[in-house]
Image: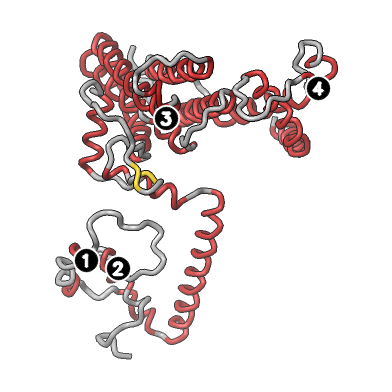
Amino acid sequence: MALTMYALIQTAILCTNAVAVLHEERFLSRIGWGVDQRVGGFGDDPNVKAQILTLIRSVRTVMRVPLILVNSVSIVLLLLFG
Amino acid sequence: MDYTAPQSGFRQHPKMRMRNTSMEGAEPSQLFDDTSVPPGAQAAGFPGQGVGATVYPAQTLLSEPMSNLAMAYGTSLAHQSKDLVEKNLDRFLPISKLKYYFAVDTVYVGKKLGLLVFPYMHQNWEVIYQQDTPVAPRFDINAPDLYIPVMGFITYILVAGLAFGTQDRFSPEILGMQASSALVWLIMEVLVVLLSLYVVTVNTDLTTIDLVAFSGYKYVGMIVGVVAGLLFGPTGYYLGLLWCSLSIFIFMIRTLRLKLLSEAAAQGTLFRGARNQLRMYLTMSIAAAQPLFMYCMTYHLVR
């Protein structure tokens, strides 16, 4: 398969965008993955679901602003260079 | 100006390049430490060689005072910028940590390659520690290194070019495509493993570079498979790939078991717990992904 670095960057941007756009109220709470529905287990938390939820939450918090910049840059580049 | 008198450091440089630069043992800002035998033993042989070297023809240009000043200024500027680059580079790329992974010697490389192809006789897979830091790969065959993965990657690209040539499909672009393809697969594999390690909350001292090293060990098996395929046809390819897949599977399981699983499970007893089961599955899937990648990256080379 002919993968390029460009494809990797595209995939990364698209996946991060998808995680950032995910609406908590409409989707995650419906399937019981909302932020307010987590069990507050202290100490060792090997719960896979809790880890994934924490990951989603932290990606959303951290990547909101950089994603705005990265998306604007990629829009401009795609308009200019196709 | 007397040229035979002790010359300025810069004018010395054109002649010095003809000798081995290990003579400059007092060079203060070496980027790469000489981690092999201390250089004092090597420098003994070299002083006699450079005496008969012919005078560098451009030395007349460098004799004028203005260019002398300019050269001195240029040298100091170069040193300053080199220091600046080194300082800033250390923030992004942990170069001092990388040096550990390249502290290898021939014996280690030979033994490690043998271990990658035939791991069934090796008994002790523990990494030797020395006051909380792992010992350099030169002294411990179980320690991960980056030399074999890097060399394996480059050799894989070259062997792929050879294989394309035998199929009359070679062009320089396809070589670049193969290189970036393999690099992307490596990056994705390391990212997926990092993600799964995070999700399963494994308390391990595996660093990202360790994971890159472990993922890079499969290039050895791929090269063996492709070379067997080039020499003996598709049968040789499948046999070689099968053998190397099994070896890398066992190698990865035995190495990762000690790093990922808890002590009880690592000693062979089946410790039934939800966490350990998950970790066992994780180890198994990482190890099983290696033969899969090996096949995917090489089947189009041997037809």
Label 4 lies in what chain?
Answer: A
Q: Residue type at mark 3?
A: Lys
Same subunit under labels 4 and 3? no
Same subunit under labels 3 and 1? yes
On screen, residue B93 above or below B220: below
Of the 4 image quadrants, the one containing the C terminus of chain B is top left
Mark number, residue B280:
none
* Whole-percent x, y for residue B161 in the image: 35, 27
Label 2 lies in what chain?
Answer: B
Kindly identify the residue that appears in the image at 41 percent across and 85 percent down.
B64
Q: Nearer the viewer, mark 3 or mark 2?
A: 3
Kindly identify the residue that appears in the image at 46 percent across and 38 percent down.
B209
Q: Earlier in the sequence, mark 1 or mark 2?
A: 2
Q: CA gap, disc 1 to disc 4?
A: 67 Å
Q: Earlier in the sequence, mark 3 or mark 2?
A: 2
* Whole-percent x, y for residue A18 in the image: 73, 22
On screen, residue B274 above or below B127: above
Kindly identify the residue that appears in the image at 75 percent across and 30 percent down.
A60
Same subunit under labels 1 and 2? yes
Q: Tag count in the figure?
A: 4
Q: Residues within 10 Å of mark 1 (few under 14, many from 20)?
A: few
Q: Which residue is mark 1?
A: B40
On screen, residue B219 above or below B9: above
Q: Is residue B247 left or right of residue B88?
A: left
Q: Residues within 10 Å of mark 4 (few under 14, many from 20)?
A: few
Q: Which residue is mark 3?
A: B259
Mark number, residue A36:
4
Circles 3 and 1 in contact, beta carbons < 8 Å: no
Q: Is residue B241 left or right of residue B46?
A: right
Of the 4 image quadrants, the one containing the N terminus of chain B is bottom left
Q: Based on the displayed image, in which of its 4 quarters is residue B134 positioned?
A: top left
The secondary structure type at the circle numbered 4 is helix
